Image (cartoon, grey):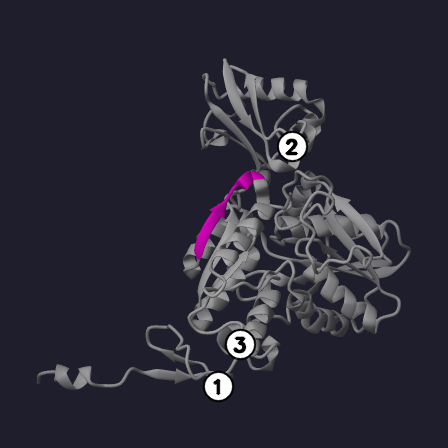
Amino acid sequence: MRFNYRIMNVLPPLKFSSSLGSTTETMSGKPTSLNRSPLPLRPDEGAPGVLGRIGNTPLYEFRQVTPKNDRVKIFAKLEWYNPAGSVKDRPAYRMIAHGEQTGALKPGKIILDASSGNTGIAYAMIGACRGYQVRLCIPKNVCIERKQMLAAYGAEVIYTDPRKSSDGAIVEAQRLMRENPDLYFYPDQYNNDQNWTAHFETTGPEIIRQTGGQVTHFIAGLGTTGSLMGTGRRLKKELKHIKVIAMQPDSPFHGLEGLKHMESAIVPGIYDANFPDDQVSVRTEDAHEMVRRLAREEGMLVGISSGAVMKAALNHSERIETGNIVVIFPDGGDRYLSESFWKA
Amino acid sequence: MSVEIQIPVALARYTGNQESLKLSGASVEEAIRNLTSQFPSLKNHLLDKKGEIRPFVNIYVNDQDIRHGKQMKTALKSGDVVTIVPSIAGGNK
């Protein structure tokens, strides 16, 4: 028997229709850009494919690394359970969905933004799902794991002067946008209200539900400030007793990836310095020590900013008599394994 | 022997806003020692209590990471460029 290649070649390409949305994918894996609905603003309202898995992360109660005062409990939102492995999936998704809904983001446009890594990885993942090219301005000194992840998702990266950190990347993204405004969709995560709104609509309600409203203190690190502003605003709206605490690096020169020392940095437009009830700072080496401790005592491999916020939570636990502290763990430790601090 | 040291923007406030300096030094260790002698307020940002480079501070000699070579004992020759950067990105003007 001979195969009839002619007949096989005229068969139409296989198509799969998602049960959760209207996106149509071909066998090449590249979604078609035409004739599809915009993404819903919340991933749990029918976002297609892996995008529907953004949010609803676990809330973990610590068993080993705990306050000395047993009337204070610490809980962490484990944000590496998001599809691209960090808390940034939430705002990146919403900014892109909002762009689709308003028409600012259309097929053929390139998603452009500055990032110190995690938001860029989230854009790259979402861009891959939706068929958008993604162009990112990233400081050259981000760790190798992030560069590898961006390459794996197929994003284009423009490396900026490492001595200028993420602010150098912001300035470069702004320059590219000015040069070619029609070419790009520029979410501008530092100044986009959809960033903090993502947390107002998802992270905040999740914490209230997962704690039964018993959370008393919320601590988050300041980077774009979206997590703190959005989650904090939701908690304050729903819970009269809540205290919101902002954590930032202790000095302008630090190793807390993604976090900003506000006094010396470009302050994001979405940040209101009068919003937090309290401000605390953490030294990089203390965050490193906490990362190692969480790995070796709690069996939890966390990122550096997670170590920093845990350090802040334990410090704060000594200042209160009773309470339930919730912190955001932005990402896991697997994207920092090339760092030298693990050897200590 | 004169080498150029490039300072991260975050630390320029401690060097009179100079982001590039000419210093002498036969090794990275000597150049950093001369740098912190000239600008003492830099010391706590770059070195730990034992006088060693803090874990998140990366030093490059002509784009080569000294951690992959002789580290602080890396020899310098006239005209070398020593660049100091945090190992990961935060955000500074």
Q: Amino acid at mark 3?
A: Gly
Residue A162 lies in the magenta stretch: yes
Query: Which chain is mark 2 on?
Result: B
| Disc 2 element | helix
Residue B27 at x, y percent in the picture: 52, 18
Q: Is residue A35 above or below residue B66?
A: below
In this view, the residue in front, A65 or A273, is A273
Quarter in which the N terminus of chain A is drawn: bottom left
Q: Residue at x 69, y 32 (%)?
A: B13
Check if mark 3 and mark 2 are on a common chain: no
In this view, the residue in front, A302 or A269, is A269
> From the viewer's perspective, is the residue at label 2 or at label 1 nearer?
2
| Disc 1 element | loop
Q: Amino acid at mark 1?
A: Ser
Residue A286 lies in the magenta stretch: no
The residue carrying pointer 1 sits among few (fewer than 14), some (14 to 19) or many (20 or more) residues within 10 Å by Cα, namely few
Query: Which chain is mark 3 on?
Result: A
Residue A259 at x, y percent in the picture: 66, 49
- Label of residue A103 in the image: 3
Q: Circle 2 sits on which residue?
A: B12
Observer able to see residue B61: yes
- Gap in angstroms between the C-alphas marked 3 and 1: 24 Å
Query: Which chain is mark 1 on?
Result: A
